């Protein structure tokens, strides 16, 4: 049997990182996780073990310490590629604490890239976001759409991170990178052993819905019904986190088998379909049989009206497509919420 290849997953106990770790191990990779546990919990490793029967190597490390990642590369000389998820991700918090975001999301990236260069690890998959497009003029949005001025420090860190990676590649360093621009990841693993664990009051729609359905929140506030959309509520492209995780494995395979034609590739990861907030509420109620109270309130500052992905490039080049139906995804989110609340 061919020797297993080892992948470093930063932020591997987080929401997308944990689902990607499961998919990587299922495909025969070894995974080494580093995470500072600032927005996740060690029990995630138990969840991973329940799904795939093995716990990945784990190090509680803060990537803002200059040599922290390098020490891991020196210890695990078989690491062949890195998937870099570790970052702070709350848009609202980033407006309040911009320095935290610039430090956590950019200093850590710089140290990672330096360590990769010094240890000759040249394959990188980076977590980017559709936030780089702002409100696109044309929908669905393609990877060639213009990047717009970010409307939060969080969004800005994703744009600057993309620029940093591009500049390194322009400098003719050995780096090969795949930038994955996520739309709105939702849902949980079908086993309900891992899922999203938001800190405090959730900012994102689906955790807020599942917590309201579970009786933890009084009601869902729908931010605005006066948008120029069919039902007046904002539209997003909600993608199942397991579908999203699978795209990372394909990106890694592509990098490790040198199938990438260019040192930098950028892919939208979404379903290609937009759903309004009200459609999400109705679909959740239909799929789970659970109703919950909601009210319409003012628009949330900084929200865009509508965005969904053109996924043609990922379909054609990666051979990847989101497959899990929305109803199934919402049921998985609800099953996970019930499990963590002992309902
Ligand atoms: N919404 C509500 N009520 C809530 C929460 C959300 O009506 O309690 C609405 C929002 O106004 C928005 C939609 O549901 O119209 C989705 O909101 P989310 O907060 O779930 O997601 P966003 O699209 O605002 O943000 C997501 C990621 C960000 C990323 C952004 C890129 O969370 O990290 O997509 O567009 F930057």
Image (cartoon, rainbow, N blue to C red):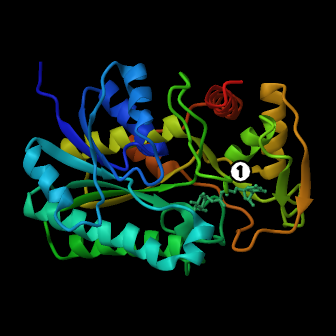
Quadrant position of the C terminus in the picture: top right
Residue 152 in sight here: no
Q: Nearer the viewer, residue 258 or 10?
A: 10
* Residue located beneath label 1 in the image: 205
Q: Position of residue 135 (x, y in %)?
A: 66, 71
Ligand 1 shown in quarter: bottom right
User: Considering only vertical position in the picture, is 183 above or below 101?
Assistant: above
Write the residue at 68% across / 35% down: 326
Write the residue at 7% across / 45% down: 77
Horizontal side, residue 134 vs residue 222: left or right: left
Q: Secondary structure at mark 1?
A: helix
User: Considering only vertical position in the picture, is 212 above or below 343?
Assistant: below
The CB of the residue at mark 1 lies under 8 Å from ligand 1: yes
How many numbered marks, from 0 up?
A: 1
The image quadrant of residue 167 is: bottom left
- Count residues near mark 1 (Cα–Cα under 10 Å), then give few for <14, some for 14-19, many for 20+: some
Q: Nearer the viewer, residue 320 or 182?
A: 182
Write the residue at 9% across / 46% down: 75
Write the residue at 63% across / 69% down: 92
């Amino acid at each position: 049997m061919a020797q297993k290849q080892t992948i470093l997953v930063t932020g591997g106990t987080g929401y997308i990182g944990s689902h990607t770790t499961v998919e990587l191990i299922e495909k025969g990779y070894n995974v080494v996780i580093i995470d500072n546990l600032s927005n996740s919990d060690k029990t995630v490793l138990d969840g991973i073990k329940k799904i795939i029967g093995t716990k990945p190597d784990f190090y509680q490390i803060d990537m803002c310490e200059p040599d922290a990642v390098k020490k891991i590369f020196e210890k695990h000389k078989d690491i062949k590629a890195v998937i870099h998820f570790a970052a702070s991700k709350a848009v609202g918090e980033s407006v309040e604490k911009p320095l935290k975001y610039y430090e956590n999301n950019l200093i850590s990236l710089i140290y990672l890239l330096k360590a990769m260069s010094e240890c000759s690890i040249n394959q990188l998959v980076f977590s980017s976001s559709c936030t780089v497009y702002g409100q696109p003029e044309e929908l669905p949005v393609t990877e060639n759409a213009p990047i717009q001025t970010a409307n939060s420090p969080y969004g800005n860190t994703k744009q600057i991170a993309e620029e940093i990676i591009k500049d390194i590649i322009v400098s003719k360093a050995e780096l090969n990178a795949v930038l994955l621009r996520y739309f709105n990841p939702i849902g949980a693993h079908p086993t309900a052993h891992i899922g999203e664990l938001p800190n405090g009051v959730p900012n994102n729609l689906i955790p807020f819905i599942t917590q309201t359905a579970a009786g933890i929140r009084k009601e869902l506030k729908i931010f605005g019904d006066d948008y120029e959309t069919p039902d007046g509520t904002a539209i997003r492209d909600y993608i199942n986190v397991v579908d999203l995780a699978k795209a990372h494995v394909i990106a890694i395979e592509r990098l490790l088998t040198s199938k990438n034609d260019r040192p930098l590739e950028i892919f939208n990861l979404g379903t290609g379909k937009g759903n309004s907030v009200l459609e999400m509420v109705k679909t959740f109620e239909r799929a789970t049989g659970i109703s919950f109270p909601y009210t319409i309130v003012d628009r949330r500052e900084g929200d865009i009206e509508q965005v969904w992905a053109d996924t043609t490039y990922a379909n054609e080049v990666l051979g990847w497509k989101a497959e899990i139906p929305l109803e199934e995804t919402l049921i998985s989110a609800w099953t996970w919420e019930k499990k963590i609340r002992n309902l």
